[in-house]
Image: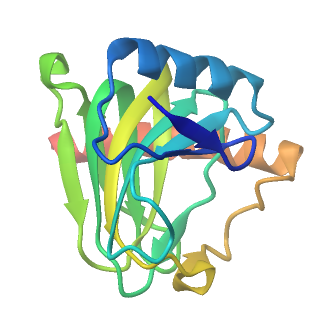
Amino acid sequence: MSIEQISQEVYVEKAPIVKVAQKDIEYLKEKAILSERKRVRLCTHKDVEEPLHEMLIVLRKETYVRPHKHLHKSESFHIIEGLVDVVIFDDEGKIIEVIQMGDYASERRFYYRLSSPYYHIPFIISDYVVIHETTNGPFNRADTLFAPWTPEENDGEATNQFINQLAEKIKKFNLNSLC
């Protein structure tokens, strides 16, 4: 790989033909450990203006990705490694779907696509999750809305409380879904 580091969490592949191997994922996992928010992404699109954005995202279990929704965008996840519950909320914060995901061998769902602007969060189950995410560009920060009923990412105590409460809500949702 011929990557350029853009920030502590963002890398961009500069080669005209992008190829990723297991050793590259291991490299990204090492970088995720070192990053403050315990996550990194490798962008395989060349810049934010491209119409198609593809990223390999590594999230550690202890990271908190604030629930958000994307205006005017679709998003898909293909799980390469690890286990994650993608939690979908309505506008008031009620869970409407929990998608239990893992790699192909896990027998969980390994792919999902979100085509409507629902609030969502990846709730990481394993130590790491490695996701191939695809979305449409160009990137515009204003197209991402954060759920107003959730804590900001830099509020450690509130995020821990939110994650603990969310874990209980996911359990209840999954139990009720079995009925």
In the rendered structure, the answer to whether residue 113 lies left or right of residue 38 reads left
Q: Quadrant of residue 149?
A: bottom right
Foreground: 15 or 73?
15
Vertical placement of residue 84 versus 55, above or below: above
Residue 159 seen in the current view:
yes
In the rendered structure, the answer to whether residue 128 lies left or right of residue 99 reads right
In the rendered structure, the answer to whether residue 8 lies left or right of residue 155 reads left
Foreground: 130 or 4?
4
Q: Quadrant of residue 116?
A: bottom left
Residue in the picture at 34% in, 79% down: 73
Vertical placement of residue 169 versus 145, above or below: above
Query: On the rendered image, what quadrant is the C terminus found in?
Result: top left
Foreground: 113 or 35?
35
Residue 99 at x, y percent in the picture = 27, 46
Residue in the picture at 14% in, 25% down: 104
How many numbered callouts? 0
Foreground: 136 or 59?
136
Residue 55 at x, y percent in the picture = 41, 49
Residue 113 at x, y percent in the picture = 21, 60
Residue in the picture at 58% in, 27% down: 61
